[in-house]
Amino acid sequence: MKHFINLKDIPVKDLRKIIVDAKKRKNLRKKLSTLEVDKGAPLKGKLLIQMFEKSSLRTRLSFYLAIRQLGGETLTLRSNELHLGQGGESIADTAKILSTYGDGFMLRTDSDKKVKNFKEHLSIPVINGLSPSSHPTQVLSDVFTVEEIKKKSISKLNISWIGDSNNVLDSLIAASVKFSFKLSIGCPKKFEPGKQVRDWVNKNNKKIFIYNDAKKAAKGADVIFSDKVISLNDKVNKKKKIEQFKKFNINQKLMNSAKKDCIFLHCLPRGSEVSEEVFLGKKSHVWQQALNRVHVQKSILLYCFGKLR
């Protein structure tokens, strides 16, 4: 049984195996309709239970399609509908029930501790659909998208992140260590990646490049990533934070600092951090990026269910 919680904890050979499988599966689906099942229905009879404590559009839809296309089914729960969410049942007891009824558990939560506790008590695989310190399914899918568009290994590319330090960036940093690509980060001094993340990079004898200047971070980039500066549950002075990121807006002028064939990716939803011209422009591949999550998550599911060949 294998979990998919943080890219830091998964061997790079397994991550690469997932990407290779996703590429094959995407190619084989070109003539299939949305709900047609993959040949062999590798997860026929399997049930993925999903629990959402945070709002979700892409994660919810992509996992629903992923398990269905593999021949399995999914059941979606909200924590406030359960005894757990009302404080009336322990995680240990909830995990026992989930393990009895389902074959896998995907959790989107505002608590890293909760993911860890579920892992300890579940006897089925756990997939992290997002937690405060990690968004591994998003970032592995992003690696897939970059390689699909650039037609080369991400290890040969210069990747730039312009924006806030958050769970997506934490996973992108982990990916930069696993896949050995150059990662340049552009953000205000106050919003740099945390000490724990940077210490982990150093421990692995790798390096990330942090700039408090967006233009310097974008220089020579093959890919520019970003995310919404103000997240849904951001408990800050939103007006002040937007002002602090004013010089980190991704506009055409900033894109001109990167390589001529640089592409733009954004995990969505978008905010004021990117101009309409860039977001809807020819260098933007955000819709392809979003759809690819289905293909990569299918391979993640197969990995967790021990069916990845």
Image: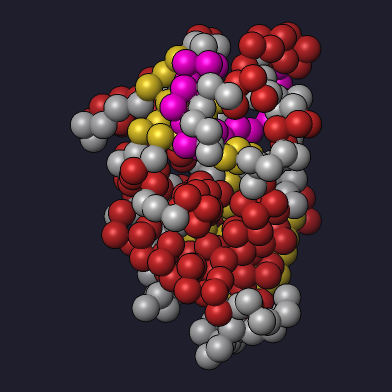
Q: Give the side of residue 82 with respect to residue 289, left or right.
A: right
Q: Is residue 103 visible?
A: no
Looking at the rendering, which quadrant does residue 26 occupy? Answer: bottom right
Q: Residue at x 61, y 64 (%)?
A: 294
Report x, y in % for residue 209: 37, 22
Q: Is residue 231 magenta?
A: yes
Q: Determine whether, in the image, residue 226 is placed left or right of residue 76.
A: left
Determine the residue positioned at 75% across, 52% down: 57
Task: Give how far across and how far down residue 166 sits, in percent.
Answer: 55, 30
Q: Nearer the viewer, residue 144 or 81?
A: 144
Res 105 quadrant in image: bottom right
The boundaries of the magenta stretch are 214-236
Give the main secondary structure of the magenta stretch.
loop
Q: Is residue 9 above or below residue 237?
A: below
Q: Is residue 92 above or below residue 189?
A: below
Question: Can you name the residue that lies furthest to the bottom here?
Answer: 40
Residue 224 seen in this snapshot: yes
> What residue is at 54 percent from the left and 16 percent from the top?
214
- Rendering quarter of residue 74: bottom right
* Placement of the C terminus among the 4 image quadrants: bottom left
